[in-house]
């Protein structure tokens, strides 16, 4: 799962040596359960594996309905699409890869998903724009790009997180997480092959609310 990232906003890179079947993903749960979608060969992305998504959305099952979600380094959009399928009120996808962004826009239009929108932009640049609070944020940058620390600092410093917001982080399993904001409380963590994935919650003055 090596990255071909050349800028802060480029999407998760696709594993090499796989055929067209690796370009097809399916929605695991919710109103779109079982739907499949294909992303183009031009999109340099590394989708979150099915079993990781299944575990993640089991973690989020009591929080996803009605949530405002931000999918950073969105790539195929698998995380944000899964959130929409399960009742998220809104998902903002952000990715700098032109092919990935175009694929996502076309898919949202095809599925009539008016509550999803795509910003084709460098992710760190996006996080320096005027912020709005989100309830759930997915952060899954290219593993080799070293962007996790910068993205998480901007999420905190620029006030992108609603009180009690949940933040999902994905990284190489053998890599340590960067230093995270002191207000972020770890809730869950697992490993699946070469992927390490973690769920945090932004602490509030009244304490963590799960």
Image (cartoon, rainbow, N blue to C red):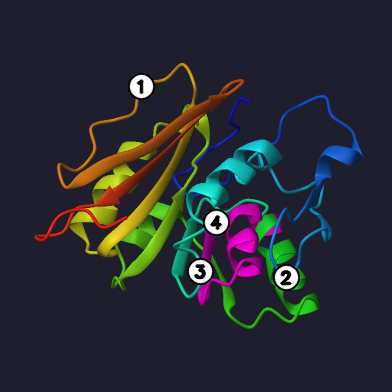
Q: Which residue is mark 3?
A: 92
Give the magenta part as a residue range: 77-99
Looking at the rendered image, the disc whose residue lies closer to the viewer, 4 or 3, is 3
Looking at this view, is 84 or 42 the one in front?
Answer: 84
On screen, residue 164 above or below 10: below
Looking at this view, is 7 or 181 the one in front?
Answer: 181
Q: Which residue is mark 1?
A: 176
Please tell me whether mark 2 sits on a helix, a strand or a loop: loop
Q: Which residue is mark 2?
A: 31
Image location (x, y in percent) of residue 58: 55, 49
State the separation of the CA atoms marked 1 and 4.
24 Å
First reached walking from the N terminus: tag 1 or tag 2: 2
Q: Is residue 190 left or right of residue 206?
A: right
Quadrant in which residue 67 is drawn: bottom left
In contact (CB < 8 Å): disc 1 and disc 2: no
Q: Of the numbered discs in the image, which one, if any, rests on residue 95?
A: 4
State the separation of the CA atoms marked 3 and 2.
19 Å
How busy is the neighbourhood of tag 4: few (under 14 within 10 Å), some, or many (20 plus)?
many
Looking at the rendered image, the disc whose residue lies closer to the viewer, 1 or 2, is 2
Image location (x, y in percent) of residue 104: 69, 64
Furthest residue in direction left, as rendered: 205
Q: Of the numbered discs in the image, which one, if any, rests on residue 107?
A: none
Please tell me whether mark 3 sits on a helix, a strand or a loop: strand
Looking at the rendered image, the disc whose residue lies closer to the viewer, 4 or 2, is 2
């Amino acid at each position: 799962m090596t990255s071909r990232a050349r800028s802060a906003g480029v999407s998760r890179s696709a594993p090499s040596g796989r055929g067209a079947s690796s370009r097809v993903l399916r929605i695991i749960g919710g109103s779109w359960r079982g739907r499949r979608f294909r992303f183009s060969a031009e999109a340099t992305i590394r989708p979150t594996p099915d079993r990781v998504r299944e575990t993640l959305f089991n973690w989020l099952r009591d929080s996803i309905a009605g949530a405002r979600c931000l999918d950073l380094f969105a790539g195929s959009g698998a995380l944000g699409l899964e959130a929409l399928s399960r009742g998220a009120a809104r998902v903002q996808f952000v990715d700098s890869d032109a092919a990935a962004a175009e694929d996502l826009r076309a898919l949202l239009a095809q599925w009539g998903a008016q509550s999803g929108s795509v910003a084709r932009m460098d992710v760190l640049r996006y996080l320096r724009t005027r912020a709005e609070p989100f309830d759930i944020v997915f952060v899954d940058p290219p593993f080799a790009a070293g962007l996790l620390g910068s993205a998480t600092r901007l999420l905190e410093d620029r006030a992108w997180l609603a009180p009690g917001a949940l933040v999902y982080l994905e990284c190489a399993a053998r890599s340590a997480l960067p230093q995270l904001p002191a207000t972020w409380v770890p809730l869950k963590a697992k490993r699946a092959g070469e992927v390490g994935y973690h769920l945090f919650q932004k602490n509030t003055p009244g304490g963590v609310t799960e």
